[in-house]
């Protein structure tokens, strides 16, 4: 393997495309001393800076805040605002609110964004919104009350306002909401030269970011796209239609954004056209927005699996309590159901109190095994790895895994039962109950999310409660039931 | 709000940049009947097609497989292979293995990829690898045994081999492994015209996908980048240095890929240069790779939170059992610890068997509340929302949420205890135990992951076991302890 000392030479070789460019006119002359390292490029949000910002807020020092915050990326400023407590946030918005721009607003978490928007002076808000691309304005507006939406829309030029209102007419979490309406498109018969001339003439009107030129037919339907890199490297006379990319894929305006994000990740898309019911090009989705959706979807699954709704660390105790209470209430019902099972066996427990000591072990192991299976299943459904064609094989496998793990832990717990309580029979009972519960856990862990998905319920949301109920009830019933048959 | 009928007119207006292009020469003449909808562009992997593929495998019909698979994206073919059972996969590789190309290999899950690579004829493998970009080859190689790596490296031209070997010298999951070494770069003093001429001359040598031209100084250090869209819309005489983007950010070769993915998502990057210890440009990371990493990181967190290791649905029962057993073993230890607590109170339980019936409720509610807190904390640590500057506020909040939820469920369970067992004292005991356990659950749920993160252990991996131990032990101890003080 090449050692590190060789790397210098090879690096230049290997960036083959730009070789002559980089190694050519500007190659370093030997003997020139290395320059000083340049100043830090992207100041991070570290604890020291946060402390300084909080001090500046306490001192209500707007100038100091500007010095501290100006070098930060809007996304980092938004994160910072999310970390403030209520008092700091209130003072911060009073002192520095007028400096908040559209990009910072876009980066704020939904719950907090509304609070910040309400606190901003009308003029600041108008300025902030005017600079944003249409998809970002839509993102900003969609969680606001109608009256606040009107406030912001009022600040926009009529043409932008019409666009935004159209986007808001699409269903929430649809491609139509996610797309930006500024599209760079060209008729299919154009060549590279025409397109470059057109782009140069349109410079001021172009979207901030675009990666493809969309080719449209006379009915405005997208029929392919050309990557900018490909266009730059082709002679002026090349027809656009001859250098389109294979990766081309369109999305319907009403398609759920989760599907769009999945397709971007699956097919390595960078941008993709969005079409209306008549197949006409109405917008474009870019990968950065798809990436944000993919991240949000994963976050939603993680939180839902744990029975936590949307929310953020900056929420107040009362909001957080309200988010978490429903799941705890569901859990209480399932726990009571398990208790009702135990209550059927009060007589046995009074005679053999060791059962009360050991019974939570069986239920707990079942609950854990069930959670393992259901998490794998929920994730596999989300990534389309679990489908109608392999579900029965996966069910068999989960049952098999439950059986093997059940047998292993049956032996372990049998020995524990034997040595702790000097009762071989108690060992048999707990071992047998363990096998039964782990097999059932494996089956429930896969069948419950698959069934919920079939009937259109998000499996991440509801599977946990069902599976735990099954493993608790089966665990207690198997253990105490077997005990009353074998031990009495 | 604009109604849907208006949309047609406004669409053309709103794609401002391309307005003249699209609405100009090729605008549809009124009265022309709509064309037939074109043929389906991207055939999806639906149950029907999967069935047909399985039939073709059973018939060992290579020609039919080619007809079915050729229209599919390599990522979909890879997903299909993952869904086969062992027998179908073996026959498929025999019959159609020689058609498998590098892109399909890249898309396969790690565990399976090794199996497929081993089954392929040497020549197919060599062809497959030669077509890939360097980052994809690295991705392919890094999970293989040394002897298999040598096999694949042997198939590559010497220059590519050297690059790959250098990439493999970087730590696993580092920016150096993730980057592609094919970089399009230009000296800082070039103008747009020079760059376009250079790109046209280099056409065949350019990477498949690139979105920025990296500007380098004479020491080969990246000093900025120019978006291709910006370049296309600027006159030939424009200096590259005058149209660089603000979003420019560099990564070190040794930086963990998770950090890179976070930064791409946080700062909306599309591509970013990677530099070595001397700050020289050695490669570039593009957003599609960062997106894949972000997705894998989220998957890892989801699975680890449930105590499931890496693995896939195509793993065999024995592999899956091995992955899940360690967590179940840990859980067994914690469950036994909880049982030891119960065992201290055998005397009380014998006298009041209702305690055995009710005690799992307290533990279960604590476990759920703890899981809620810890999941929020793990996610907030992953997204950098939970930091040193807000951790104490979040701890106070979690304790507050635990207290409020505890009080609510204390009342509910108090009433259940009262009416079910006609004992007000039993109601007090379970209510009090509930409050104690939910507050402790909130505290443990946040402090355990924060502490694990501090000492460098992945909080997603280990928090669950610790928190459940705490809530089980505290739950049983508080309930039975209070019972023996108050009820006896």
Image (spheres, coloured by chain):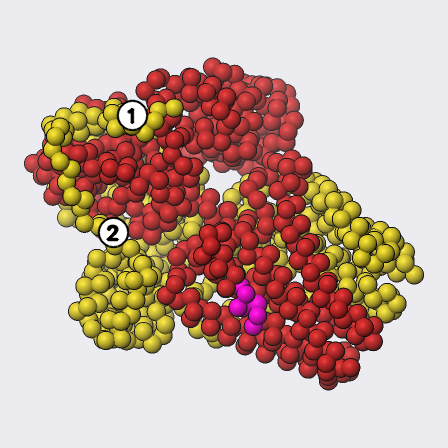
Chain colours: A yellow, B red
- Horizontal side of residue B316 vs B227, given as left or right: right
Please tell me which residue is depicted at 51% across the width and 26% down the height of the picture. Answer: B145
Can residue B56 be seen here? The reply is no
The span picked out in magenta is B439-446
Which residue lies under the disc numbered 2? Answer: A42
Which residue lies under the disc numbered 1? Answer: A6
Q: Position of residue B362 (x, y in %)?
A: 67, 70
Q: Quadrant of the C terminus of chain A?
A: bottom right
Nearer to the camera, B153 or A481:
B153
Viewer-side label of 1, 2? 1
Please tell me which residue is depicted at 47% across the width and 69% down the height of the picture. Answer: B395
| Outermost top residue | B123
Q: Is residue B440 magenta?
A: yes
- Give the letter of the chain under mark 1: A
Q: Position of residue A260 (x, y in %)?
A: 42, 46
* Labels 1 and 2 touching (C-beta < 8 A): no
- Horizontal side of residue A412 vs A146, given as left or right: right
Please tell me which residue is depicted at 12% across the width and 30% down the height of the picture. Answer: A31
């Amino acid at each position: 393997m090449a050692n590190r000392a060789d790397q210098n030479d090879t690096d230049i070789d290997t960036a083959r495309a730009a070789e002559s460019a980089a190694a050519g006119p500007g190659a370093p002359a030997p003997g020139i001393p290395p320059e000083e390292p340049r100043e830090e490029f992207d100041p991070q949000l570290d604890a020291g800076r946060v402390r300084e910002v909080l001090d500046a807020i306490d001192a209500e020092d707007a100038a100091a805040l500007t010095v501290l915050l100006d070098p930060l990326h809007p996304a980092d400023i938004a994160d910072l605002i999310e970390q403030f407590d209520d008092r700091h946030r209130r003072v911060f918005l009073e002192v520095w609110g007028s400096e908040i721009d559209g990009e910072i607003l876009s980066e704020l978490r939904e719950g907090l964004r509304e609070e910040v928007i309400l606190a901003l002076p009308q003029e600041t808000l108008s300025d902030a919104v005017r600079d944003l691309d249409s998809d970002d304005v839509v993102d900003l507006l969609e969680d606001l009350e109608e009256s606040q939406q009107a406030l912001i829309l009022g600040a926009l030029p009529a043409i932008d306002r019409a666009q935004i209102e159209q986007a808001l007419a699409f269903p929430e979490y649809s491609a139509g909401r996610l797309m930006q309406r500024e599209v760079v498109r060209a008729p299919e018969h154009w060549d590279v030269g025409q397109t470059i001339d057109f782009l140069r003439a349109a410079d001021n009107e172009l979207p901030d970011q675009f990666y493809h030129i969309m080719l449209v037919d006379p009915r405005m339907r997208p029929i392919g796209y050309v990557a900018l890199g490909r266009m730059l490297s082709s002679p002026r006379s090349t027809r656009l239609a001859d250098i389109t990319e294979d990766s081309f894929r369109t999305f319907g305006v009403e398609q759920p954004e989760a599907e769009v994000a999945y397709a971007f990740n699956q097919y390595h898309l960078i941008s993709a056209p969005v079409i209306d019911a008549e197949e006409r090009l109405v917008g474009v989705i870019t990968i950065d927005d798809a990436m944000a959706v993919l991240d949000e979807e994963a976050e939603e699954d993680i939180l839902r699996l744990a029975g936590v709704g949307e929310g953020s660390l900056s929420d107040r105790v009362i909001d957080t309590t309200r988010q978490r209470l429903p799941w705890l209430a569901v859990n209480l019902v399932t726990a009571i159901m398990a208790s009702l099972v135990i209550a059927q066996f009060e007589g046995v427990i009074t005679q053999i109190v060791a059962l009360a000591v050991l019974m939570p072990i069986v239920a707990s192991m079942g609950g854990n095994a069930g959670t393992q299976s259901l998490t794998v299943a929920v994730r596999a459904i989300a990534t389309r790895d679990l489908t109608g064609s392999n579900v029965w094989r996966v069910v068999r496998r989960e049952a098999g895994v439950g059986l093997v793990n059940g047998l292993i832990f049956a032996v372990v717990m049998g020995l524990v039962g034997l040595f702790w309580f000097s009762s071989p029979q108690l060992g048999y009972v707990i071992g047998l109950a363990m096998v039964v519960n782990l097999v059932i856990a494996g089956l429930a862990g896969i069948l419950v999310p698959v069934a919920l998905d079939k009937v259109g319920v998000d499996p991440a949301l509801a599977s946990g409660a069902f599976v735990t109920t099954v493993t608790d009830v089966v665990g207690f019933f198997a253990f105490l039931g077997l005990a009353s048959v074998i031990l009495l």
